[in-house]
Amino acid sequence: MLRRQFTTMVPGMLVLGAWHSQAQAGLLSQSDASLGVKTALERGAEAAVSLLGQSDGFLGNPKVRIPLPGFLNEAAKLAKFTGQQKKVDELVTAMNRAAEAAVPEARSLLVAAVKGMSVQDAVKVVQGGETSVTDFFAGKTRAPLGTKFLPIVTRATEQVSLADKYNALAGKAAGMGLVKQEDSNIQAYVTRKALDGLYLMIGEEEKKIRQDPVGTGSDILKKVFGR
């Protein structure tokens, strides 16, 4: 059958290797395939935002929980011996709460990116590797989302007195090569990690759709991704 020309490239990713012959047979057109990809990405984006943009969306999820970076994370492990563990925990909690507060701002930009997706974009996502979804959304939205996230993260982290101390300590650590320069500012660090977590979870949600298109209840997803 012509539908068997849909073959797996990597787990959860499909290769649309026979669009033209599929279309001639009336099984699947390029427009259907493009619509299916858009629907999957939009659903994945909506689900990821809803999952992360709530209390413990980051803090309670080990896949995206934001730790202190590099040397500072290692140093924090010693804090319990100096009576500073509570303060460190407060900072880590504030970092993750900041990410949770920022993520809902991503919804409109992510949806707009999907709606503006070309057929060529859809082909790249479907034929790409495991990071193709992340690469698509990051390429379209990372810069504008970073601009939207930063003031939200800044307000949230300013509520913790350790934030300024973090920046001072991390700045010195970066000068000694113990912390990456890009991680030496807590606001910039949390913003970047929040975006990383968002794109990761969008990819996770899309994999679920690809693995069980029938379970989505969507006719177009069943048509494009169903076997």
Image: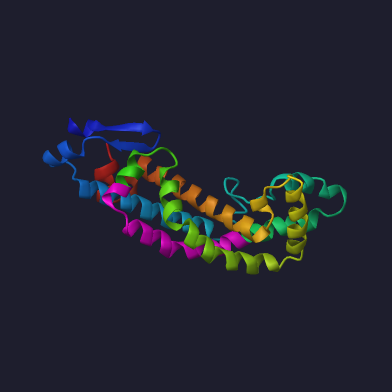
Residue 175 pos. (x, y %): 75, 50
Q: Report if residue 26 lies within the magenta region.
A: no
Residue 75 pos. (x, y %): 79, 46
Dividing the picture into quadrants, the one containing residue 189 is: bottom right
Q: Nearer the viewer, residue 113 or 59?
A: 113
Q: Is residue 12 above or below residue 196?
A: above
Q: Report if residue 112 lies within the magenta region.
A: yes
The C terminus: image quadrant: top left
**How many tags in the picture?**
0
Please state if 10 lies on the left or on the right of 147 as rendered: left
The residue segment tinted magenta is 98-121
Please state if 39 lies on the left or on the right of 180 as rendered: left
The N terminus: image quadrant: top left
According to the image, what is the colour scheme of the structure? rainbow
Magenta region, mostly helix, strand or loop?
A: helix
Dividing the picture into quadrants, the one containing residue 158 is: bottom right
Q: Nearer the viewer, residue 173 or 219?
A: 173
Residue furthest to the front: 175
Residue furthest to the right: 82
Give me the residue at 78% from left, 48% from top.
76
Residue 55, can we see it?
Answer: no
Residue 45 pos. (x, y %): 42, 55
Residue 180, can we see it?
Answer: yes
Please state if 7 lies on the left or on the right of 139 as rendered: left
Give me the residue at 73% from left, 47% from top.
73
Give me the residue at 37% from left, 62% from top.
112
Q: Is residue 55 above or below residue 35?
A: below
Dividing the picture into quadrants, the one containing residue 20 is: top left
Give me the residue at 62% from left, 61% from top.
97
Q: Nearer the viewer, residue 166 or 227?
A: 166
Please state if 182 lies on the left or on the right of 138 as rendered: right
